[in-house]
Image (tube, rainbow, N blue to C red):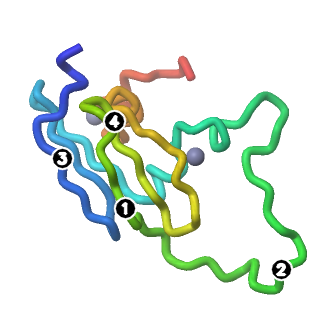
Amino acid sequence: MSSTDPEHIAISKSKGITIDWKDGHSSSFALGYLREHCPCATCTGAHGTPPTTKPASSPFQMYKPALKMLDVESVGNYAIRIVWNDGHSTGIYSFEHFRRICPCEQCAGQKGSAA
Ligand SMILES: [Zn+2]
Ligand SMILES: [Zn+2]
């Protein structure tokens, strides 16, 4: 339980989020990584359903503005909601989720091949 309590959260809307945990661990999440690991139902995708549908006919399809967080709101004491500049805002990132997706070598090693 206590290992998923954040001691300090540093948010940079153009770079990402760094969380220092109460157990001394520190996690840095780049924007793209966070967006890819959005925990909402749309992004995780129901079985057999493509998570995103892109309009195939847009001539501007190639143009992608740099990913940014427009807003970050705390949700209770257990999570934060990220509003992305691509219009997505339904991802509620619990601290447990953050800890689970910690990209550091130590945590990546622990995950093994279970996923
Ligand atoms: Zn999502
Ligand atoms: Zn880690």
CB within 8 Å, label 1 to label 4: no
Vertical comparison of 61 with 55: above or below: below
Considering depth in this image, is 68 or 75 the residue closer to the camera? Answer: 75
**Element type at mark 3:** strand
Upstream in sequence: badge 3 or badge 2: 3
The structure residue drawn at horizontal position 67% and vertical position 42%, both measured from the top left corner, is 42
Q: Which residue is mark 1?
A: 71
Q: Nearer the viewer, mark 3 or mark 1?
A: 1
Query: How far apart are labels 3 and 4 at the CA level?
Result: 11 Å
Query: How far apart are labels 2 and 4 at the CA level?
Result: 35 Å
- Figure quadrant of the N terminus: top left
Q: Nearer the viewer, mark 2 or mark 1?
A: 1
What's under tag 3, amino acid-wise?
Ile
Upstream in sequence: badge 1 or badge 4: 1
Vertical comparison of 19 with 71: above or below: above
Query: How far apart are labels 3 and 1 at the CA level?
Result: 15 Å
Q: Nearer the viewer, mark 3 or mark 4?
A: 4
Q: Where is residue 94 shown, x and y percent of the image? A: 37, 33
Q: Where is residue 8 shown, x and y percent of the image? A: 12, 43
- Figure quadrant of the C terminus: top right
What's under tag 4, amino acid-wise?
Ala
CB within 8 Å, label 3 to label 1: no
**Element type at mark 2:** loop
Q: Where is residue 46 shown, x and y percent of the image? A: 75, 31
Q: Where is residue 35 shown, x and y percent of the image? A: 50, 53
| Residue 9 tag number | 3
Q: Is mark 2 within 8 Å of ligand 1?
A: no
How many residues crowd around disc 1 within 10 Å: few (fewer than 14), some, or many (20 or more)? few
How many residues crowd around disc 3 within 10 Å: few (fewer than 14), some, or many (20 or more)? some
How many residues crowd around disc 4 within 10 Å: few (fewer than 14), some, or many (20 or more)? some
Upstream in sequence: badge 3 or badge 4: 3
Q: Residue furthest front?
A: 76
